Image (tube, rainbow, N blue to C red):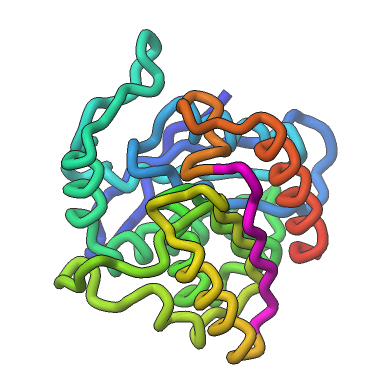
Amino acid sequence: MSEQVLLVGDGGDAVPAELFRPPAGGDEPRPAVVVVHEVFGLDAFTRSVAERFAAEGYVAIAPDMYGREGVPGPASTDDDPAPIWTTEQIRAAVLGLPDRRAVRDLEAAAELLAGESLVDADRIGVIGFCMGGNLAYLLGCHSRRIAAVVDFYGRLVYDDLSPNKPVQPLEMALNLTAPLLGFFGAEDTSIPLEHVRLFEERLTAFAKEAEIRVVPSAGHGFFNQLRPAWNDAEARATWERTLSFFDEALV
């Protein structure tokens, strides 16, 4: 079960989020993770990821990045947990979310975790998928609270810069302060392999602690069991590596 909480986000705005605690047992400080949703919003898939972390002993929080204006496309419901969005809706949603505001909202989520009695404030990670993968990485480039980053197929190069997207994600690599694990699908047509390799080169050039994995036979969104691109075998393998990575980084 989750608890509804409010974050003090960018500009002092109230940002809704869901907090997931592990099963009762033991009061020793434990690691925590911020779970950043896909472009589709805080939906059944995102909650399932947070629940899986809680089952592994983490305290997890899933902020609603659309909490101010509402979901800019078809919302997930019990009857339709993974509604189909058009390409235009996806593009408009991504471009409409300001990076700087999103990062500050996510920082607020990490701060809330740090204040939890069950949480070791030095062992907070972040994981994100799709749009959320990009934001998880950006959080790792801005926040000193984050100790580990997992990026599932976050966009690395914007088609165009704008007030909402003022800096190319690749250009932020120098600022990354936490170990990073990145997963990108070999068959992901939305994130060219050349961008992934350039990202890897930047991280290496700046001596960042990073592991970039190109997942064979996987397209964009391969981890989401509710979407057509789901790849069961690769989702299982990347989940196991994610858990071992957090075990290694959040010590």
Judging depth in this view, the residue of 203 and 144 nearest the camera is 203
Location of residue 211 in the rendering, given as x and y in whole percent from the top left corner: 69, 68
- Is 202 magenta? The answer is no
Q: Is residue 116 above or below residue 17?
A: below
- Is 209 magenta? The answer is yes
In screen coordinates, is 89 left or right of 35? Answer: left
In screen coordinates, is 66 left or right of 117? Answer: left
Tally of numbered discs: 0
Q: Is residue 105 above or below residue 59?
A: below
Location of residue 69 in the rendering, given as x and y in whole percent from the top left corner: 16, 42
Q: Give me the residue at 58% from left, 76% from top.
A: 200
Q: Give me the residue at 34% from left, 37% from top.
A: 41
Q: Is residue 53 visible?
A: no
User: In the orientation shown, which residue stands out farthest toward the top?
Assistant: 79
Q: Give me the residue at 84% from left, 39% from top.
A: 26
Q: Quadrant of the N terminus?
A: top right
- Quarter occupied by residue 50: top right
Q: Give me the residue at 76% from left, 30% from top.
A: 24
Q: Is residue 104 visible?
A: yes
Q: Quadrant of the C terminus?
A: bottom right
Judging depth in this view, the residue of 116 and 137 nearest the camera is 137
Q: Is residue 45 above or below residue 154?
A: above
Location of residue 114 in the rendering, given as x and y in whole percent from the top left corner: 59, 59
- Quarter occupied by residue 125: bottom right
Location of residue 129 in the rendering, given as x and y in whole percent from the top left corner: 48, 48
Magenta-colored span: 208-218
In screen coordinates, is 95 left or right of 47? Answer: left
Judging depth in this view, the residue of 219 and 211 nearest the camera is 219
